Amino acid sequence: MLNYGFMQNAIFVSMFIAILCPCIGIFLVLRRYSMIGDTLSHASLAGITIGLMANQNPILGAFIFTSICGALIEFLRSYFKKYTDLILTIVLSLSVGIAITIISSGKLRANADSFMFGSILTVTRLDVVLVLILSAISVLTLILLYHQMIYIAYDEDAAKVAGVKVGLINYVFFVLVASAISVSIRIVGVLVLSSMIALPVATALQLGKGFKLTLIFSIVFSVIDIMLGLFVSYYLNVAPGGFTALVSVAVLVLVLIAKRLQSSISAARSK
Amino acid sequence: MIKAEKVFFSYTGSPPYVLDGINLKIRTGDYMSVVGENGSGKSTLLRLILRFIKPTSGSILSQAKRVGYVPQKNDFSNANFPITVYEALNSYRKLLKIKNRGVITESLERVGMTNFTGVLMGALSAGQNQRILIARALMGDPDLLILDEPLNGVDTNSQKEIYDFLKKINRENGITIVSVEHNLDAVISNSTLIYHLMGGQGHLCTPRRYADEFLKYRGKDDTHA
């Protein structure tokens, strides 16, 4: 299996997804923005279809269009302060509307289905290079803005008092979300992409650790989820995206059960 | 240090105003408590001073170079955020661009919390949590400390210790303090000035005068404040 070129590409890209998604996801989850991740995942489909229609790389199309949608969400927040969930409906309507219109027009020069469900067969060398560049820039940006991002998520007012340019960093953050989504589309697929962003973080949060350890455990769970999903889906001959989502849920359930067992044992010992 | 002139503020940008043309002067070294009923605009005034929001009209000028801020506990919805005391203070140190890591231990020593570095913020009691937030606010060596109902939900013993500490840093270190308060005993014994907000208007007075007026008022209507 590992001798196949497409499988090597898939593993390489999967490793970047496994690292990048929880790094971005932890901030989305802790800011209670998980649904923004979901909305932007679906928005990326419009970018893919625009890219395919223009005969350009669909990952690049997804990255640019999802970044624009992320900026739009941040921009609209000031107009819909009391109805922020409406913003997601607006962006979702715009992007899914574009995607469906383009797909149904018959003007696509390729099949968009593989981006919906994820596929390990369609990862090209150019995709690998793009994923590498986007991931490297994203991780570097995250390292540079690490403390600012923690404080914006933890205590935005304190961040403002300390002089953090919250508005600007929010825009940068949405570009990073767009980057993580674009990197993940090929393997995971649009429909279950948000599971890769949120579920490893949700699992790590159950361990009750500090920020750095939660982030490290999120990456560990993410690697387990995506690698198991990739290899097992290969043997089962099913789409890797859907199966990775199932593995993510299974790992979360296992951790929840282990946590419950541990607290039961602790309670029994203390009696 | 802070000068507010004819400040009007409403969240919609039009009347009725939460703050209806207030004028206020806070000098360096003052310990001013802001009091008033719920919805009287106390927290709004703090947010204006902190420049989180802009006045609808009028101006607020501040000469403070370094500001420390302790948020209202009830506003702090991130009680379960996975962050240890050390991480919370270390990241804040980085934001303030303080190179010396020792400042974390120093600020924890000031509030008697040096043994809590590895503890999750969410696992602290209300009193311990507020001490850490005060330690964080003091880390940048501020000349102005702003507190929004800092001791809501904190037990009486901890309240006394923290109020004594605030009074000490105000009197000995000259840190100007502006604090929204509900605890009238603490207001009267700690503050050098009291700013009473009511119906969008502010009334500045000394603690002694406020005590006399408040006690007289309370004699007529026990529901006040």
Image (spheres, coloured by chain):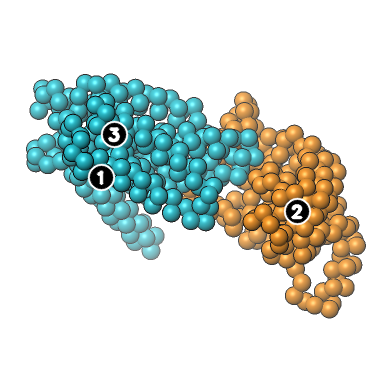
Chain colours: A cyan, B orange
The answer to which of A35 and B190 lies nearer the viewer is: A35
Q: Secondary structure at mark 3?
A: helix
Q: Position of residue A83 (x, y in %)?
A: 48, 56
Q: Chain of mark 1?
A: A
Q: Earlier in the sequence, mark 3 or mark 1?
A: 3
Mark 2, Cα crowd under 10 Å, few <14 / some 14-19 / many 20+, is many
Q: Which residue is mark 3?
A: A50
Q: Residue at x 72, y 35 (%)?
A: B66
Q: CA distance from mark 2 to mark 3?
A: 49 Å
Mark 1, Cα crowd under 10 Å, few <14 / some 14-19 / many 20+, is few
Residue type at the position of mark 3: Ile
Q: Which residue is mark 2?
A: B8
Horizontal side of A260 relative to B133 (left or right) equals left
Mark number for residue A100? Answer: 1
Mark 3, Cα crowd under 10 Å, few <14 / some 14-19 / many 20+, is many
Q: Residue at x 48, y 36 (%)?
A: A171
Residue type at the position of mark 2: Phe
Q: CA distance from mark 1 to mark 2?
A: 49 Å
Closer to us: mark 2 or mark 3? 3
Q: Secondary structure at mark 1?
A: helix
Closer to us: mark 1 or mark 2? 1
Horizontal side of B73 relative to B9 (left or right) equals left
- From where the camera sits, is residue B52 visible? yes
Q: Are marks 1 and 2 in contact (CB under 8 Å)?
A: no
